[in-house]
Image (tube, rainbow, N blue to C red):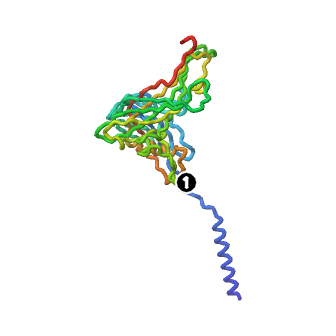
Amino acid sequence: MRTINKQYTLLAMLFLLLFSACENEIDYKGSAPKPRLIMNALLSADTIHNKVYLNLSGNQGTPDIKDAVVDFYLNDVLKETLDYIPYNTEPYNTRGYYLVTTPFTEDDNIRIEATSSDGALKVYAEVVVPRRVFIQKIDSIYTPKANSNNPDGREGTMNLKIALNDSPGVKNYYRLEVKKNYITHGFLYWEECDTIQCRSDYGFQSKSDMALNDGKPNSDISDGLASYIPNIYGAFDDSYFKDKSYTLNIDVFFDDSDSNYSFVDEVKYKCLEFVVSLQNITEAQYHYLRVMNLLDSDDYDPSMSQPVQIPSNVIGGLGFVGVGIGDSQKLIISESFGEEDK
């Protein structure tokens, strides 16, 4: 009996030891990921007001880096050390950025280097400006919205056909952008001055175009797993018109009512304009925009898709730097004048 009792005692002690071990908390001693610089920029040769965004990765968000040294090289020559522009210091500036004022053109080599104030973190990225593309012409057809109840303006769809010539001998990647500007010129009583104000938004519908839909125009039918993803960033390549001319076919909805314009006391002039921009971009930027287009789409369902990796070309850190060059044209959609200016 003593032998049996000893065996039961040993088993009970072993059970208690194992049970208590399951209750113990084990401290995690692994180190947190080291912070890294995040540099993002989509540069354009069509302006001398380019922006470079610099942030710091970490578990507590990605704060802006305001005191870094950011150098801009053009064809291996240092052109400028960029100034930091804080947010809300200019209209619609909701993020701080480093300002690039150096002009550049096709075939230029651009290198941007960023170093933290303590010298511990350093990143850089290099891009080559592609060939310039030109808009050959734009044809437009207006279709009013059926049963529109707009009492003070036009409402409908403008169909735009945008002709371009593909740069021969190389693979080309493009980006199309349409900006709608609602411009108001008038007088403000409380400031006792004239003012010109502008409200803007972007966007177009491209279901009817082959190049903007990977060869599948009018594709809006789900295949059972994934729905149609609109090309909201307007990135496309020349697979369907290589070394030839091509005409993009898009629709732009607009509402020319008073509510879309800024308020002024005495309206002297109102205008709705479309700014159509076409750029030749780098291959890396094309793939970056396609990935971001997928992630930013309202129809994207991560539970039904494979994990997506965001492209990065920043050495030593994270982020993406791209560059484009191209052409733009303005279309005056509607305009009106105050009584005294007619």
- Quadrant where the C terminus is found in the figure: top right
- Disc 1 on helix, strand or loop? helix
Residue at horizontal 36%, vertical 30%? 136
Residue at horizontal 55%, vertical 44%? 298
Q: Quadrant of residue 316?
A: top left
Residue at horizontal 44%, vertical 26%? 330
Q: What is the x, y in percent for residue 146? A: 57, 32
Q: What is the x, y in percent for residue 322? A: 41, 38
Q: Which residue is mark 1?
A: 303
Decide: is 86 above or below 194: below
Judged from this view, the residue extending furthest toward the bottom is: 1
Badge 1: residue crowd in 10 Å (few <14, some 14–19, many ≥20) = few
Number of marks in the rendered image: 1
Q: Amino acid at mark 1?
A: Ser
Decide: is 156 above or below 231: above
Camera-side residue: 100 or 235?
A: 235
- Quadrant where the N terminus is found in the figure: bottom right
Q: Quadrant of residue 109?
A: top left
Decide: is 304 above or below 68: below
Camera-side residue: 141 or 59?
A: 141
Judged from this view, the residue extending furthest toward the front is: 147
Decide if residue 118 is in sight here.
Answer: no
Left or right: residue 63 versus residue 286 is: right
Judged from this view, the residue extending furthest toward the left is: 169
Left or right: residue 138 versus residue 65 is: left
Decide if residue 9 is in sight here.
Answer: yes
Decide: is 135 above or below 297: above
Q: What is the x, y in percent for residue 206? A: 47, 39
Left or right: residue 108 versus residue 138 is: left
Q: What is the x, y in percent for residue 191? A: 61, 16
